[in-house]
């Protein structure tokens, strides 16, 4: 196994992590921004106010996008395990 192959696998894994975590992070960012604007407008400065909406938003996003995330991970691992003998014999 050469260093080029290891770097390709690492690059693909990092891209997969970014691609799979993006929906959850974007939903959390959007909800945090909305709650922050709401807190500014109403002058409510409760620090724990963002926790429940973010938690519900992330759970809803996992329900909606969980299958897509799982398919991406399974596809990556299937490709990785399928080429395992090639990696070992190098």
Image: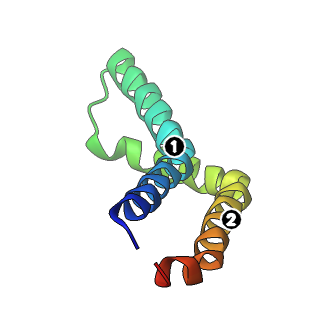
User: How many numbered discs?
Assistant: 2
- Residue furthest top in the image: 41
The quadrant in which residue 86 appears is bottom right
Assign a secondary structure to mark 2. helix
Instruction: Report the front residue among 10 and 56.
Output: 10
Which quadrant of the view contains residue 72? bottom right
Q: Quadrant location of the N terminus?
A: bottom left
- Assess disc 2: are there few (<14), some (14-19) or many (≥20) residues with their C-alpha within 10 Å of its C-alpha: few
- Name the mark on residue 75: 2
Frontmost of labels 1 and 2 is 2
Residue visible at 42% across and 27% down in the picture: 33
Answer with the quarter of the image where residue 41 lies: top left
Residue at image position (50%, 37%) is 26
Q: Position of residue 22 (x, y in %)?
A: 51, 43
Q: Is residue 5 left or right of residue 27?
A: left
Q: Nearer the viewer, residue 21 or 51?
A: 21
Position of residue 5 relative to residue 43, above or below, is below
Name the image colouring: rainbow
Rendered location of residue 17, percent (x, y): 47, 54
Vertical placement of residue 24 versus 63, above or below: above
Q: Secondary structure at mark 1?
A: helix
Q: Are marks 1 and 2 in contact (CB under 8 Å)?
A: no
Residue neighbourhood size for the residue with mark 1, other residues' Cα within 10 Å, grouped as few (<14), some (14–19), many (≥20)? few
Residue identifier under label 1: 22
Residue 64 appears at what percent x and percent y? 72, 52
Furthest residue to the front? 90
At 65% from the left and 52% from the top, the residue drawn is 60
Mark found first going from the N terminus, 1 or 2: 1
Q: CA distance from mark 1 to mark 2?
A: 18 Å
In this picture, residue 15 sits left or right of residue 77: left
């Amino acid at each position: 196994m050469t260093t080029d192959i290891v770097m390709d696998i690492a690059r693909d894994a990092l891209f997969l992590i970014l691609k799979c975590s993006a929906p959850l992070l974007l939903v959390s960012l959007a909800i945090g921004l909305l709650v922050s604007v709401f807190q500014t407008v109403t002058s409510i400065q409760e620090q724990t106010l963002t926790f429940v909406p973010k938690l519900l938003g992330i759970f809803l996003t996992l329900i909606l996008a969980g299958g897509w995330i799982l398919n991406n991970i399974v596809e990556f691992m299937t490709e990785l395990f399928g080429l395992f003998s090639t990696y070992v014999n190098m």
